[in-house]
Amino acid sequence: MKVSAITIRPGNVLEYNEKLWVVLKNDIIQPGKGAAVVQVEMRDLASGNKTNVRFRTQETVERARVDEVEYQFLFETDGDYAFMNVENYEQITIASDLIGDPKVFLQDGMIVQVQIHDGKPLGVALPDQVTMQIVEADPVVKGQTASSSYKPAVLENGVRVMVPPHIESGTRIVVKTADNSYVERAKD
C-alpha cells in the first residue's frame, strides 16, 4: 500500500529496496531554504542492520501489510519469549531482539499486539503503560520540595526511573513502556 512519506510513524513496516524495514524514528526537517524532508531511521527485519533515509514529504513509500494479533505473554526461556494467541490458543516463540528494550516490562498474562507479515512475527507492541512496584527509592532531601525535582528509584524488574519526591519504596506506579518515564501513582 502506497502512503505519503509524511505519514510514516515509528513501528510502521516499509518495503524499501526489496526488503522489509521497521521504522524506529522519524523527524520532519524543514530547512531554511528548499522543501521539507522526512528523516527516517529504520532497521532491516531480516539482518537487523539500521539505516537512515531521507524522503521528500510529497514522496510515496510502500507500506507492508502487517496484521496485528492479540497474544498473551506466557514465559521467557533463554532469550526466547513464548506467546499464545488469545483466539485460537496457538503458541509462538519470539526472539528478544524483535521485542526490543520494552521486554523488561513483560508480565505473566500480559496481552500484547504481535505484528505479523506473511505468517512471520515482526515485532511486539506492549501496552503504552504498565503498573509496577518500586523496590528501592532514595530518601527525600530536606528542602527539595519543588515540584520539578525528581529522584531516582528502582522498579521490581530492575529498571531505574525518576519519580517525584513523595514516592517511596513499596509504592505502585504507572510507567510508560516507551521511555521508562513516570506517569502517576497507581490507583489501587
Image: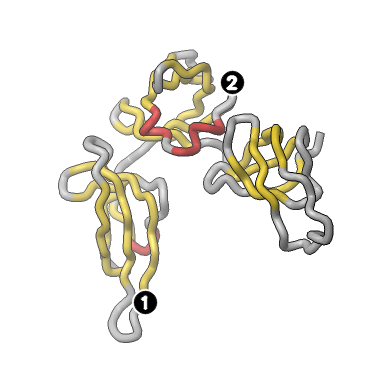
- On screen, 10 above or below 73? below
Extreme residue toward the left, this view: 18
Q: Residue at x 38, y 68 (%)?
A: 28
Q: The C terminus is located in which quarter?
A: top right
Mark 1 and mark 2: span between their CA atoms?
A: 44 Å
Please state if 91 lies on the left or on the right of 31 as rendered: right
Residue 87 position in % (x across, y down) = 51, 19
Q: Is residue 137 left or right of residue 74?
A: right
Image location of residue 8, percent across then percent down: 37, 56
Q: Residue furthest bottom?
A: 33
Mark 2: few/some/many CA within 10 Å (<14, 14-19, 20+): few
* Label 1 crowd (10 A; few <14 / some 14-19 / many >=20): few
Of residues 1 and 5, the one drawn nearer to the viewer in this rendering: 5
Measured as percent of width and height from the top left, residue 82 is found at: 45, 18
| First in sequence: mark 1 vs mark 2 | 1
> Label 1 is placed on what type of residue?
Gln
Residue drawn 78% across and 41% down? 168
Residue 119, numbered label: none
Residue 30, label in figure:
1
Task: Tell whether 111 sits left or right of 164.
Answer: left
* Among the 4 quarters of the image, the one containing residue 180: top right
Q: Amino acid at mark 2?
A: Asp
Q: Which residue is mark 2?
A: 108
Residue 122's place in the image compared with 93, above or below, is below
Q: Nearer the viewer, residue 101 or 149?
A: 149
